[in-house]
Image (cartoon, grey):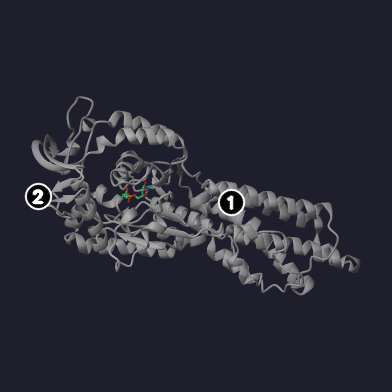
């Protein structure tokens, strides 16, 4: 069982391209794992509590519950549009989740992991939060962005995080591959050095935050939004769920020796996932073997290369993009033009260029050639009968190499490299077609068998390409399988990818272009040339 999750998105605003990237990336990984033959459970969802939501709802003059329902819908619509196919959907206002959070709070309290104490500190009335030394400006003051700052005493519940940090240091130091990419582990260990000794405030007094999960043993407090949100990974996996809760069987999704994969952005590794969550799991009695793997992806910067922000007005809207360029172009770009773990600048010219060169020109051309020529020259009937030349054998080797590189890249969550491996074979096939010139062979009756062999090599390559492409572009892959007239392609596993997917005498279907070129009619766009 391969259990994979994404971060759950804040519902205080609309989804942007960063949200879309994370969910498409996870969808691609989930689909790839299925292609490998694994059973997969993919959980995603929304983070609906907390101060930000309460504040935005107030600004809009609606109650938080109405507000989150409205924004949650935007996320649901986006996943449907982008063909993100999850198995479980997490909403933190769900009663089953609340019951799980409350159960965990009670257990941790009974185990002596929680305590209540009062804290005196500087509090920003405008931002409704306690400030820390890092919030001071160069002259040591709290700047005007914090508004009125007052010294305040407040009681809260704390989780004894500090009791788990030595364990965490040892665990991280001695366990390879739990933080991906590895350079993030060094950052995490550094942060742990700086943070050790601190416990975590896990409550907010109701006087300043009402929109949260009420403490089961202290009605004056709600749960801190991160403590609440992180628990989604287990609550929606069926952790300590009631029998009739319609949730998965937890022991199947998260067995004693199983590590789920949490896909998260680089901004929420430290401290939320890398420190709080791993320590929370440890406190709940999860073993080292059960600690999740954290796959930490990078950020898309907005158009122009700056960090995306409302004030710069450079936030990329995934719905607009999909409407303009098509869902497949967006999905392809989001996993092709970024190395998992690194940042990238969102660039429309590159979106168009990558679609037009790698899909419309290379793969599209190969599909058109293979299917159209087979239809026109042999009535759509395939035959692999003839003797093989060095060129044919080189093509078959190129395919084998390509599948092997694809698989090792995808196993390491490096989708861009996996697609590159697939593209190498597609380019090889187009060059093969140029050299073999089936259109010339057609003119010579003595070359009938040779023509069939060449066409078979091209069509067989399209069949493999459609399977390899399917995690990224499921719709295009399904169309190709239909045109090849081979529905079973949609059910294949990676292990089934051997030469000869298309049986002798197979009759292909009617070819139709699957990757129409994106044409942009702005005069200065190079990509439209
Ligand atoms: O952090 N590029 O929610 P969120 C790539 N609710 N990824 C980006 C991005 C960008 N420009 N901007 C944001 C939260 N993300 C919490 C998570 S999990 C228990 C709770 C990623 O809506 C970000 O890193 O701010 C995170 O993984 C996800 O989008 C949701 O961000």
Q: Is residue 301 visible?
A: no
Q: Label 1: few (<14), some or many (≥20) within 10 Å?
A: many
> Percent position (x, y) of residue 185?
41, 35
**Res. 419 mark:** 1
Secondary structure beneath label 2? loop
Q: Quadrant of residue 267?
A: top left
> Percent position (x, y) of residue 160?
22, 39
Question: Residue drawn at (61%, 53%), measured in percent from left and top?
Answer: 358
Labelled pair 2, 1 in contact (Cβ < 8 Å): no
Name the residue nearer the viewer: 469 or 358: 469
Check mark 1 vs ligand 1: CB closer than 8 Å? yes or no.
no
Question: Residue drawn at (29%, 66%), measured in percent from left and top?
Answer: 245
Name the residue nearer the viewer: 131 or 38: 38
Name the residue nearer the viewer: 281 or 355: 281
Question: Residue drawn at (41%, 53%), measured in percent from left and top?
Answer: 255
**Res. 207 mark:** 2
Secondary structure beneath label 1? helix
> Percent position (x, y) of residue 426?
67, 54
Q: Is residue 26 toward the left or the right of residue 75 in the image?
A: right
N-terminal-most mark, 2 or 1: 2
Q: Residue furthest right?
A: 446
Q: Label 2: few (<14), some or many (≥20) within 10 Å?
A: few
**Res. 98 mark:** none
Question: Residue drawn at (64%, 49%), measured in percent from left and top?
Answer: 404
Q: Is residue 17 toward the left or the right of residue 417 in the image?
A: left
Q: Is residue 32 toward the left or the right of residue 22 in the image?
A: right
> Percent position (x, y) of residue 322?
45, 60
């Amino acid at each position: 069982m391969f259990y994979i999750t994404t971060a759950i998105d804040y519902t205080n605003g609309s989804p942007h391209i960063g949200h879309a990237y994370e969910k498409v990336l996870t969808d691609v990984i989930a689909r790839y794992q299925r292609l490998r033959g694994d059973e997969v459970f993919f959980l995603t969802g929304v983070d609906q509590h907390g101060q930000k939501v309460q504040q935005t709802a107030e600004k809009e003059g609606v109650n938080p519950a109405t507000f989150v329902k409205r924004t949650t819908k935007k996320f649901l619509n986006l996943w449907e549009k982008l063909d993100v196919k999850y198995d479980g959907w997490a909403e933190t206002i769900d009663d089953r989740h609340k019951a799980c959070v409350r159960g965990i709070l009670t257990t941790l309290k009974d185990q002596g992991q929680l305590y209540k104490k009062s804290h005196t500190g500087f509090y920003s009335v405008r931002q409704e939060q306690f400030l820390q030394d890092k919030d001071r400006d160069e002259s040591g003051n709290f700047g005007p962005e914090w508004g009125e700052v007052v010294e305040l005493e407040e009681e809260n519940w704390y989780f004894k995080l500090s009791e788990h940090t030595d364990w965490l240091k040892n665990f991280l130091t001695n366990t390879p591959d739990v933080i991906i990419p590895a350079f993030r582990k060094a950052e995490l260990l550094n942060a742990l050095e700086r943070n050790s000794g601190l416990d975590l405030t896990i409550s907010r007094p109701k006087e300043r935050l009402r929109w949260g999960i009420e403490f089961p043993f202290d009605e004056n407090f709600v749960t801190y939004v991160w403590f609440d949100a992180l628990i989604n990974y287990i609550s929606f996996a069926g952790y300590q769920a009631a029998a009739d809760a319609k949730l998965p069987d937890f022991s199947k999704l998260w067995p004693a020796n199983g590590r789920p994969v949490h896909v998260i952005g680089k901004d929420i590794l430290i401290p939320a996932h890398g420190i709080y969550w791993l320590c929370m799991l440890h406190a709940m009695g999860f073993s080292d073997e059960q600690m999740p793997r954290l796959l930490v992806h990078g950020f898309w910067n907005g158009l122009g290369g700056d960090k995306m922000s409302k004030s710069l007005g450079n936030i990329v809207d995934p719905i607009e993009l999909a409407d303009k360029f098509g869902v497949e172009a967006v999905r392809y770009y989001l996993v092709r033009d970024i190395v998992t773990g690194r940042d990238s600048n969102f660039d429309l010219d590159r979106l168009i260029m990558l679609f037009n060169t790698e899909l419309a020109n290379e793969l599209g051309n190969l599909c058109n050639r293979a299917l159209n020529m087979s239809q026109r020259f042999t009535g759509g009937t395939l035959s692999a009968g003839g003797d093989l030349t060095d060129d044919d054998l080189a093509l078959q080797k190129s395919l084998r190499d390509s599948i092997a590189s694809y698989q090792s890249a995808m196993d390491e969550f490096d989708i861009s490299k996996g697609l590159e491996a697939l593209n190498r074979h597609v380019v090889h096939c187009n060059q093969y077609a140029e050299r073999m010139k089936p259109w010339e062979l057609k003119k010579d009756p003595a070359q009938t068998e040779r023509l069939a062999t060449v066409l078979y090599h091209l069509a067989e390559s399209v069949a493999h390409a459609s399977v390899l492409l399917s995690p990224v572009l499921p719709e295009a892959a399904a169309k190709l399988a239909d045109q090849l007239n081979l529905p079973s392609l949609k059910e294949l596993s990676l292990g089934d990818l051997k030469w000869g997917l298309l049986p002798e005498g197979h009759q292909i279907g009617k070819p139709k272009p699957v990757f129409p070129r994106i044409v942009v009619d702005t005069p200065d766009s190079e990509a439209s040339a």
